[in-house]
Structures are given as C-alpha cells and as structure tokens.
Image (cartoon, rainbow, N blue to C red):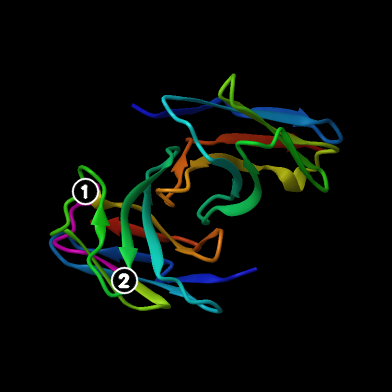
Amino acid sequence: GAVVSQHPSWVICKSGTSVKIECRSLDFQATTMFWYRQFPKQSLMLMATSNEGSKATYEQGVEKDKFLINHASLTLSTLTVTSAHPEDSSFYICSAMGYNEQFFGPGTRLTVL
Amino acid sequence: SQKIEQNSEALNIQEGKTATLTCNYTNYSPAYLQWYRQDPGRGPVFLLLIRENEKEKRKERLKVTFDTTLKQSLFHITASQPADSATYLCALGDTGRRALTFGSGTRLQVQP
C-alpha cells in the first residue's frame, strides 16, 4: 500500500519556540493532506485540510496563525506549531488522500516543556 | 452535533474467541464507514471500508456490518490472537468532505 512518512517522529521543545513537522507521501502524489491531533485516550481530531497550491482550511476552534500549514508540493505538507505551549503537547498525525483512500503517517509526538 | 460512540471500556477476550466491537453514531448520514487499527504511539492503519449500501464486508478474519437504520457498525475479529491486541477506531466519511470523523476507539486485549 501507499506510504506516508512524518518527520520527526518525536520532538521535545521549550515553551515559546516553534516546531515544524513534515508529512510526505512517498510513492504517490496527494493534492489533499489532512492534519489530525490526538490527545491520550481520545479520538483523532481533524485540525485542517491542506490543499496543494492553496491555503489550508482550518476546523472551527483551530488557530490558523498558531498552526501554520504549507502544502508546497504534491508530496509534502508541513505543519508549524508557532510559539508552542505545554497545552500543545499532543500526537500529531497527517494523512494523504490517494485515489479513493486516506493513508496515515506514523505520527509525531510533540512535548512542550 | 455529530457524535460517534465506541465502547470506551477495554474489551478483554480469550485467544481463539470472536471479538465484537461496536460503533454507534448520531446526527450523521455517512456515505461510508471505515475501521482502523492503532497501536500505541503509532498512526492508524486501515482495515476495512464499508459503504452505506453494503450490509456486510469480510476480509480474512475480519467482518464488518453496517446498519444505517440503527446507525451502527459492528466489527468482528474471529479466531482472535494476542497479536490482535490494539485499539480499534471507527471513522465515518462522506463523499463531499473527504476528511474522516473518528470515534475514540476501543482497546482490545486478547489473552493467550
């Protein structure tokens, strides 16, 4: 099946710093990628839909100035958590839309101290 | 508002038995429903998709049913094995909005 990678797999940062997470579709092109966030023992919550070459669409309650999304190519979307705070600590998962199916990345564990 | 409910209690079963997990939803008319497996610290892995006009889908030891009247899907793992221990998520989708809406998952523990 199609492969989606994320980098880094985990990151620890200080409060106030910015962190960039990359999501790549390795063997297919994805015009649409999704970013989800998952807190412990909770569901995956959609944060935003990333469309190649255009602005991301954010879900209600997600601050677009805090979670910057760039989808510059058909195989790469990035999520930058700006001025991170401890409450941003979570598991961030991306997915890439294939022809008729979503393929999920392995996730990135962000811990903000 | 849309709501997806999965049994938050962990399901413990003996190896070789059939595990049955439930997904109920309200205020939603999905075009399809998917089941995923998620291991700790990992992203979800796709297992099965069933469309609104399908009643049942099978894949090896897995079986999914979809009752749009009851607004419920059942996910069965037959001849369960300890390696099947994981959290299982149901996710609903529609043709217009391609992002998925996930339930919170049910943790399955298969005892040897």
Q: Is residue A83 magenta?
A: yes
For mark 1, what is the residue?
A62
SS category of the residue bearing label 1:
loop
Q: Give the range drawn in magenta.
A: A79-87
A31 and B41: which is toward the camera? A31
Give the residue type that dot 2 points to: Thr
Q: Residue at x 50, y 54 (%)?
A: B41
The image shows residue A55 at horizontal and vertical percentages of 22, 66
Image quadrant holding the N terminus of chain A, namely: bottom right
The image shows residue A40 at horizontal and vertical percentages of 41, 42
| Horizontal side of residue B42 vs A75, given as left or right | right
Give the residue type that dot 1 points to: Val
Q: Which of marks 1 and 2 is nearer the N terminus?
A: 1
A72 and A84: which is toward the camera? A72
* Circle 1 Cα neighbour tier, 10 Å, few/some/many (<14 / 14–19 / ≥20): few
The image shows residue B1 at horizontal and vertical percentages of 33, 26
Q: Is residue B5 magenta?
A: no
* Circle 2 Cα neighbour tier, 10 Å, few/some/many (<14 / 14–19 / ≥20): many
SS category of the residue bearing label 2:
strand
Q: Do the residues labelled 1 and 2 touch (CB within 8 Å)?
A: no
The numbered mark at residue A78 is: 2
